[in-house]
């Protein structure tokens, strides 16, 4: 029992000195999202999410709302049915004008900015991904 107490005390002192986030937080993230970084390079991951974000926008623009929602994570699928996706897309076009084309896309970590040209304006659509490459958030431009 004394060894356990000494180990616990030593561990708590170490946490205090090093910082909780340095020791514990990365381990929690690894447990929550089991991805072996050595198997999937960052470049491959970013290329994958960029393609998915572009396909998402293309599917919305082609009114293929079931296809647009296929890469949503479980929580997003509850919020975003294909009917909701259609409504969001229609509401967006009320203020931006009709979709003309997807101009470009850029990746920053787990965020893909898809630049879209509409009749009235060119705007960025934010598509956010989890480590498994599923869409966890979409932010339409605020017009």
Image (cartoon, helix red, strand yellow):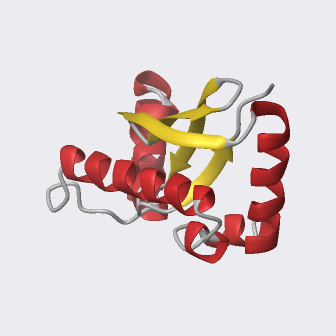
Rendered location of residue 112, percent (x, y): 46, 39
| Point 65% across, 47% down: residue | 138
Question: Count the marks: how many?
Answer: 0
Q: Considering depth in this image, is 80 or 40 the residue closer to the camera? A: 80
Left or right: where 67 falls relative to 44: right
Relative to 124, residue 74 above or below:
below
| Residue 20 can be seen, yes or no | yes
Considering the image in quadrants, where does the C terminus appear? Answer: top right
Rendered location of residue 21, percent (x, y): 49, 34
Rendered location of residue 125, percent (x, y): 60, 37
Left or right: where 65 falls relative to 87: left
Q: Considering depth in this image, is 38 or 46 the residue closer to the camera? A: 46
| Point 50% across, 34% down: residue | 20
Rendered location of residue 65, percent (x, y): 66, 70
Looking at the image, which residue sits at the far left?
Answer: 38
Relative to 54, residue 69 above or below:
below
Quarter location, residue 39: bottom left
| Point 75% across, 52% down: residue | 89
Q: Considering depth in this image, is 95 or 5 the residue closer to the camera? A: 95
Quarter location, residue 81: bottom right
Relative to 20, residue 76 above or below:
below
Relative to 139, residue 39 above or below:
below
| Point 20% across, 44% down: residue | 43
Q: Considering depth in this image, is 28 or 103 the residue closer to the camera? A: 103
| Residue 12 can be seen, yes or no | no
């Amino acid at each position: 029992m004394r060894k356990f107490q000494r180990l616990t005390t030593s561990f708590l002192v170490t946490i205090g000195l090093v910082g909780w986030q340095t020791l514990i937080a990365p381990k929690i993230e690894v447990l929550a999202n089991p991805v072996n970084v050595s198997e999937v390079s960052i470049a491959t991951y970013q290329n994958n999410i960029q393609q998915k974000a572009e396909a998402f926008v293309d599917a919305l623009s082609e009114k293929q709302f079931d296809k647009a929602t296929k890469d949503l994570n479980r929580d997003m699928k509850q919020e975003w049915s294909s009917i909701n996706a259609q409504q969001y897309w229609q509401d967006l076009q009320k203020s931006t004008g009709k979709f003309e084309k997807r101009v470009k896309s850029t990746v920053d970590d787990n965020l893909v900015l898809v630049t879209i040209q509409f009749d009235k304006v060119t705007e960025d659509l934010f598509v956010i991904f989890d480590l498994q490459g599923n869409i966890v958030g979409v932010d339409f431009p605020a017009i």
